[in-house]
Image: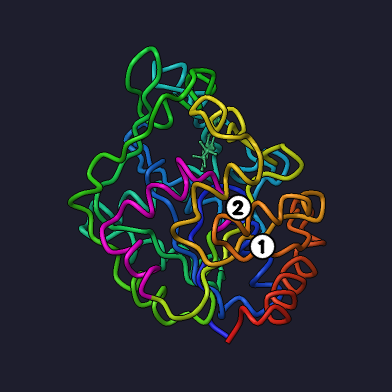
Amino acid sequence: MRITVLCGGLGGSRLVDSLGRAAGAEAVTAIGNVGDDVEILGLHVSPDLDTVLYTLANLLDEERGWGVRDETYGALGLAGELGGETWFTLGGRDIGLHLVRTAMLRDGRPLSEVTARLASALGVATRILPATDDSLRTIVTTPDGDLSFQDWFVRRGHRDPVLGVRFEGAADARPAPGVLDAIHEADLVFLAPSNPFVSLGPILAVPGIADALAERSGPVVALAPIVGGRALRGPLAEMLAAQGHEPTALGAARLVAEHADAFVVDPEDEKLAPAVAELGLRPVVAPIVMVDPDHRASVGRGLLDVLDREAALP
Ligand code: FO1
């Protein structure tokens, strides 16, 4: 069984981990968002790729949902004393990874190759591909003007209402090597329970990726990023409401309906299944809360079993 997951942020990395624990890490390919990438103190940071890397390498600070656990902040502290920017919290071990990534990028290696090398060095068997090796940056439009993603999310604490989102560079971006094949050749493609605006949106904006999903003969299965009216992490519920969408799993389903065949809701949202079906999506009900690493293998197995029973698998 070959599984490909389009993912961003914590929800995405948890799904990749859950499916890897259920089907084997080598069976899974993760296609990650790079719209959040940011240059801090001269270092290239790829937060969403790193959340997948750190989750699978068992290094993630699971409590915070980003960065490495048990970090120390001596490097950032001195950078601050010297007048460097400190609004983006980089721990010492995390900085080690960014140093190596940045050096390899400056040597002219593409982000996809750099990511593969980092994964291999960390003992991660799952293939992690950036959606593109080209520059693509998420820009958030707010009442105070346009902000780069991390300015909006971290520097300003995602308090500004989001009026719209665009992806700078997307029109000229090409899918990274292996991305389209991973979509075409997988038995099963998942759209992770990631924010559809700022995590899945930048991936789907890369020309060729949405077409590859549409051309598949096998199923594309999206997972609800909202359970019981709450996003498990992040500002999705507020973003849905601010843009006139229902802040529920159904509101999120509407945003991915054109790209998916099936939509999985948690048993807590079973009552939304008929409305999901009206969107032309096959509703699937299965536990999808993957917060606790010890529950992830069973969530992954449960998902694959229910999709198998519902004949959504080949
Ligand atoms: N999120 C924060 O809320 N504050 C931070 O200081 C912060 C630092 C950071 C450093 C490395 C990294 O990989 C992620 C980091 N994040 C931080 C998370 C990140 O901004 C977002 O979670 C993602 O971009 C959204 O998917």
Task: Give how far across and how far down residue 116 sits, in percent.
Answer: 41, 68
Task: Give how far across and how far down residue 259 sits, in percent.
Answer: 44, 60
Between 36 and 222, the one lying in front of the other is 222
Query: What element does badge 2 sit on?
Result: loop
Specify the label residue 283 is tagged with. Answer: 1
Determine whether 271 is above or below 166 in the image: below
Q: How many marks?
A: 2
Please tell me which residue is depicted at 41% across the width and 76% down the height of the picture: 216
Quarter of the image where the C terminus is located: bottom right
- Quarter of the view holding residue 236: top right
The residue positioned farthest toward the left in the image shown: 172
First in sequence: mark 2 vs mark 1: 2
180 left or right, relative to 298: left
Q: Mark 2 points at which residue?
A: 193
Task: Give how far across and how far down residue 63 sits, in percent.
Answer: 73, 41
Determine whether 122 is above or below 87 in the image: below
Quarter of the image where the N terminus is located: bottom right
Overall secondary structure of the magenta section: helix
Identify the magenta region: 192-215
- Quarter of the view holding residue 148: top left
